[in-house]
Image (cartoon, grey):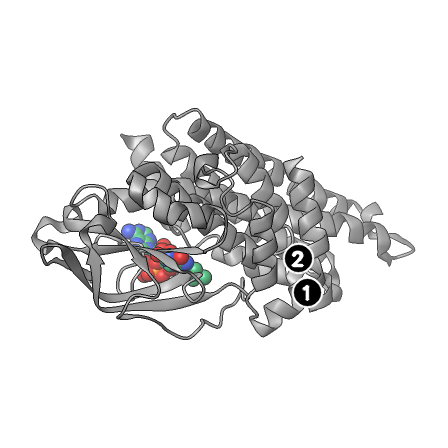
Amino acid sequence: MIRKAARDFATNELLPGVIERDEKMKYPAEQVKKLADLGFLGMMADPRYGGGGMDTISYVIAMEEISKVDSSVSVIMSVNNSLVCWGLETYGTEEQKQKYLAPLAKGEKIGAFCLSEPEAGSDATSQRTTAVDKGDHYLLNGTKNWITSGGTAKVYLVMAQSSVELGHRGINAFIVERDWAGVSVGAKENKLGIRASDTHSVMFQDVKVPKQNRIGEEGFGFKFAMKTLSGGRIGIASQALGIAAGAYELSVEYSKQRKAFGKQISEHQAIQFKLADMATEIEAARLLCFKAAWLKDQHKDYSLASSLAKVFASEVAMRVSVEAVQLHGGYGYVKEYHVERLMRDAKITQIYEGTSEVQRIVISRSVLS
Ligand SMILES: Cc1cc2nc3c(=O)[nH]c(=O)nc-3n(C[C@H](O)[C@H](O)[C@H](O)COP(=O)(O)OP(=O)(O)OC[C@H]3O[C@@H](n4cnc5c(N)ncnc54)[C@H](O)[C@@H]3O)c2cc1C
């Protein structure tokens, strides 16, 4: 049922304007509103807070179907679900959940996750944004870079350094509202892929953050970010899976229509083998996503599994989408056939929420420990 609902939504609501939104970098406001109405912005959150109460496997399935068509929409969905809602639900106080999680899980508000900075990406320990303890509040100063939904979000989860001498143990996580004095947003980034999504710098200048808006104990911020990103990677892995599966489905269809040398190109063995390789890799990626999701649902350790799923699925998305363009020949190189967009969108899955190199660091640490 989840797959069908997500697929119908992607086909009926996302596909019609996806090329134009990509070209014009147009934020999918109407589509995100409908996604909220479907309950896909807080799928896994507890129904007590307005969420769908579904498991992570359902989330992977929905992410796959939506990403087959529009990853600008699925990245908004992924950040809101697995970084913002999950982080608040797992580590927030009851008061924080009532106030912030409920509107986010219902999709009445969109959330953003602010970890990266101009000088701190893969090395998230070197946060330059500061949050100085002023008694009843913290004073927040700094700039976050590349923030998904940075322009539209009403709630930001922000990591900042409160005690430099403690290194990453001095980092805190805060809930910050967009409308507070001192919060401002830079211009929308002009990107290679996921162009309709809303990526911005977010600046904080002398923003007063009440003490009750800190998430967890003093110094919990880095752990909060790492734990949250572990689950987030399942979302991005399933986005990559969807991009690959979308490119593959278009390729199968096209190969049965296009004729060359007097027969359908699907009758040439070289094309058949491309499709066979795509199908094999996609199935393996899907199973890695399901395994990570299953471990999370069973409350077992899923940090290795989510890195395995992300690094593999994102590399499959890249390989499959490049092959899909090749299989479409010249038509693959123009926008109407969708595969060039999928190829551009695939690249980001190897970069955000931990690059492929960072995933290999996580995996090799685990293998060698
Ligand atoms: C479209 C988009 C959306 C994003 N959304 C968000 C968001 O919502 N919130 C957020 O906080 N961030 C977001 N990001 C930021 C993203 O997570 C970072 O870009 C990413 O973590 C990489 O950091 P960096 O860009 O600083 O690259 P760097 O860390 O500077 O890395 C540069 C290169 O060096 C490699 N490298 C770095 N360290 C090592 C090492 N130890 N060993 C081997 N190789 C290494 C990297 O893998 C990479 O290839 C987004 C980025 C983009 C482009």
Residue 135 seen in the current view: yes
Residue 285 seen in the current view: no
- Horizontal side of 190 relative to 96 (left or right) equals right
**122 or 4, which is in the foreground?**
4
Q: Amino acid at mark 2?
A: Leu
Numbered circle sitting on residue 17: 1
Query: Contact, CB < 8 Å: mark 2 with mark 1?
Result: yes
Numbered circle sitting on residue 295: none
Q: Position of residue 54 (x, y in %)?
A: 52, 33
Quadrant of the snapshot with the C terminus: top left
Task: Count numbered badges in the picture.
Answer: 2
- Horizontal side of 109 relative to 341 (left or right) equals left
Residue where numbered disc 2 is placed: 14
Q: Amino acid at mark 1?
A: Gly
Q: Secondary structure at mark 1?
A: helix
Q: Secondary structure at mark 2?
A: helix
